[in-house]
Image (tube, grey):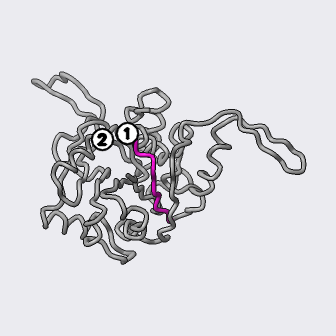
Amino acid sequence: MKAVILCGGLGTRIREVNETLPKPMLPIGGRPIVWHVMKTYASHGIKDFVLCLGYKGWMFKEWFLNYRTMTTDITVNLGRHQAVEFHSGHEEEDWRVTLAETGLHTMTGGRVAKIRRYVQDDDLFLMTYGDGVADINIEELIDFHRSHGRVATVTSVRPPSRFGEMVLRNGRVQSFVEKPQVTEGSINGGYFVLDARRIWSYLSDDSGLIFEREPLARLAQDDQLVAFDHDGFWQPMDTSREYQLLNRLWDEGNADWKCW
């Protein structure tokens, strides 16, 4: 089973953090956020990935091509053949990563359509975004999808509030919670499960097709879209404030998405 990760967007809303890196390559604790997403899948046994590339796709290729060099101790012999000796392995040696060029300006639905050949031989595949982390139980998500038999499952989440919440009684503050989760109003949290045989009738080769609009609307209309409710940790990285938050949580040892 493969996990498809959308990594091709321009990331204009967070460009002030780093002008040179695509958003999924922005580091959380020294590793790209997309690596954290992949580690979540890998901790549940999903280690075959397809990354849908677009903006500065070569940076993803460069990073993964040099993964072993960057993550282990090495000795370089500076003779004629410049032999390299690796002194240890790493936990990701059994990962398989397909880096697929899906177009600079292609929208999300078009990107999924372009990687059909990599996933269509399986009965289903997983899909999410390369710029958000969660402590979602992937195995439970897959079991839930198989139980209902429809084309697609989307993970529903309640986003964290931008503001702290006060509980008042007679004008006095009884308690204060910093940025709690919103109690009402679920949104698309990514982490989809898609039927690898039937999803294509909802997609097309149109590079302007946005997965979250017409395809999801048609799936819902046909009663082929079911929500998997996740009430645990979930945090996107759309702004510099959220980028700083994720790094602070990691540095403080409070990275609730870390399940490895």
Q: Residue at x 59, y 51 (%)?
A: 64
Outermost residue, bottom direction? 206
Q: Is residue 216 above or below residue 162?
A: below
Name the one closer to the observer, 10 or 204: 204
Total residue callouts = 2
Q: Are marks 1 and 2 in contact (CB under 8 Å)?
A: yes
The Cα atoms of the two marked residues, 1 and 2, are separated by 6 Å
Left or right of 21, for residue 75: right
Left or right of 166, for residue 120: right
At mark 1, the secondary structure is loop
Predominant SS of the magenta segment: strand
**Label 1: how many residues lie within 10 Å, few (<14), some (14-19) or many (20+)?**
some
In the rendered structure, does residue 52 fall within the stretch colored magenta?
yes
**Label 2: how many residues lie within 10 Å, few (<14), some (14-19) or many (20+)?**
some
From the image, tell me which residue sits under label 1: 44
Q: Residue at x 48, y 71 (%)?
A: 103
From the image, tell me which residue sits under label 2: 139
Magenta region, residue range:
45-54
At mark 2, the secondary structure is helix
Locate residue 185, reporting x and y percent: 17, 48
Name the one closer to the observer, 174 or 127: 127
Q: Is residue 122 above or below residue 134?
A: below
Quadrant hosting residue 208: bottom left
Quadrant hosting residue 202: bottom left
Amino acid type at mark 1:
His
